[in-house]
Amino acid sequence: MRRFALSKKDRLRTDLEFQAVRRQGKRFRTKNFLVNYLVREDSQLRLGVIASSKIKKAVARNRAKRLLREFFRLNRKEIKSILASGMKRDDFGLDLIFVAYPGAELLKYQEVRDELIEGFKKEAKRLKRDAEKTGSYFN
């Protein structure tokens, strides 16, 4: 069963790591999720998951977090390639924090995937557009 689990190196584990992503990183919002991300120099992708306390039942919060972990596990390479297209670089790592809001626990996996992939594509376009305005690509 552990074969599909996220290892310790794949997770954000301390409050300081979460704070660093929130303070230094960028974010975008979809209908049911907030995504905070921080580009790093190494090549590791790490995940942090939060379910809003506005999702009242613990069972529902846990379902939302399971959906997000599964999305990350199955799509980590696609996430990185989508953002790489917007940044014009391939040699980077990411710290990601997904925040689930009410309604996320009602979605099926495919709906979560479609919503987040679309969000990452929009963010890549925004990164590309901002880079063209300023003349330098996101670090």
Image (cartoon, rainbow, N blue to C red):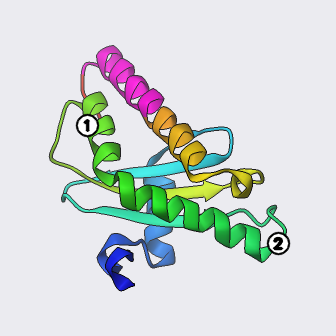
User: Measuring 53% from the left and 48% from the top, which residue is drawn there?
Assistant: 35
Q: Position of residue 104 (x, y in %)?
A: 69, 53
Q: Position of residue 136 (x, y in %)?
A: 24, 25
Q: Which mark is residue 84?
A: 1
Q: Residue furthest right?
A: 56
Residue located beneath label 2 in the image:
57
Residue 130 covered by magenta stretch: yes
Q: Residue furthest bottom?
A: 1
User: Measuring 51% from the left and 35% from the top, which residue is drawn there?
Assistant: 119
Q: Secondary structure at mark 2?
A: loop
Q: Main secondary structure of the magenta part?
A: helix
Q: Picture quarter containing residue 46?
A: bottom left
- Relative horizontal placement of residue 6, taking residue 48 as reference (left or right): left
Residue stretch in magenta: 121-135
Q: Which mark is residue 30?
A: none
User: Measuring 84% from the left and 68% from the top, which residue is drawn there?
Assistant: 56
The quarter in which the N terminus is drawn is: bottom left
Residue closest to the eye, 91 or 58: 58
User: Measuring 77% from the left and 67% from the top, which residue is drawn there?
Assistant: 53
Mark 2: amino acid:
Lys
